[in-house]
Image (spheres, rainbow, N blue to C red):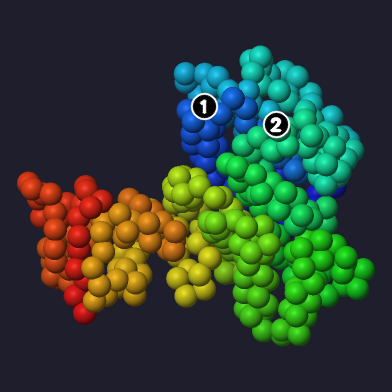
Amino acid sequence: MAAPKATVWELAPHTRAKHAILKRYLQAWMVILSQAKFPEILYIDGFAGPGEYDKGDPGSPVIALQTALDYRPPLTAKIHFLFVEKDKERSAHLKSLVDKMTLPANFAVIIEGGETFEAAFGKHLPAYQRNGRLIPTFAFIDPFGWSGVPFSIVQQIMRQRSCEVFVNFMYDEINRFIGHPDQVSNFNEFFGTTAWEACKALTNPRERNRFLHDLYIKQMHEAAGIKYVRSFKMSNDKDVTDYFLFYGTNELLGLKKMKEAMWRVDESGEFRFSDATDPHQAVLFGNEPNAEQLKRNLLGQFKGKKAKVGEIEDFVVVHTAFRETHYKKVLKNMETATAEIAIDWAPEGRKRGQYGSKDIVISFKP
């Protein structure tokens, strides 16, 4: 999607879905951190926009504020919001919306207009550090392209405790301009490496798509030191990739909650969201998980082996597209219908097909 020129513009269906994912995740993130007794948390919107669309639908900064306001009982942690919007007319529009909201004393909102994300982040970073460390942060980085999104910011954020990033990787725009000689330095900053240049020799569209996707994931893991990374692909009805959403966290609970948000995306037929982390296990999100695909994942990892239910759950959450709520139905079928697994140990009174204890030991037949 090309960057709009108007102050406010029409809300596209795929953007509506992206915002639904953001809202669902923030509902969990804010509560988890508040209950964990962190005295302060920070939400960053690096490309905040005007705060609403032409028909009044809320933009991402308003969604974040309203999500925090709606929680009951009220959140007690100090919640900082840093909204960055380079376009001064849009930032002014956002400010007018925020000024109309009644915010509690523990909400601290800064709207930085006329500054790039990079400049604003560097400017305000000291205010959000305690003893030299960034307070727990969720950074939503949602540009229209790639400039102004240096990978060094992702690295800075993810070096700190309890911080997470959610990056919109605008593949369609990036792919169209990645060979432009004027953009070399911008892409070096965006990827945090010059390795992206190898994609210019790839003429097969699918190979180039996968190369750039995998390079960004590699950078998140290796250069930013992120433990858990998953990517989600938005494709249009012609199966053309519009963008990838890259989510990075060092907390397993965060990964579980992001998957929960993704699996609740409504299907409209105008676009398709899928987990694209593993090219051999691409999974389309829908109302019901693909049980056969999850079964193949389980057999690929555990066939001929023994494993505790807790180990199986960790594998599903970390290494597949599926949720921790999906695998038990598959195990039940494998135990009661196809006899592909056997129970080596279970607590007394355990009923067949139930896996409530993570210490249950399962043997997968060869």
Q: For mark 2, give the secondary structure.
A: strand
Q: Which mark is residue 37?
A: 1
Residue 132 in view (yes/no): yes
Identity of the residue furthest to the left in this view: 349
Q: Nearer the viewer, residue 218 or 92?
A: 218
Q: Which mark is residue 319?
A: none
Whole-percent x and y of residue 327? Answer: 30, 58
Task: Find residue 131 and report its image quarter.
Answer: top right
The Cα atoms of the two marked residues, 2 and 1, are separated by 15 Å
Whole-percent x and y of residue 329? Answer: 24, 57
Residue at the image point whose x is 92% and y is 68% from the top: 182
Amino acid type shown at disc 1? Lys
Residue at the image point whose x is 59% and y is 53% from the top: 248
Q: Nearer the viewer, residue 246 or 133?
A: 133
Task: Find residue 173 and report its image quarter.
Answer: bottom right
Residue at the image point whose x is 53% and y is 37% from the top: 29
Q: Is residue 241 above or below residue 25?
A: below
Q: Which mark is residue 130?
A: 2
User: Going from the N terminus, do you reach mark 2 or mark 1 first?
Assistant: 1
Q: Which quadrant of the rendered structure holds the N terminus? A: bottom right
Identity of the residue furthest to the right in this view: 182
Whole-percent x and y of residue 220? Answer: 64, 60
Amino acid type shown at disc 2? Arg
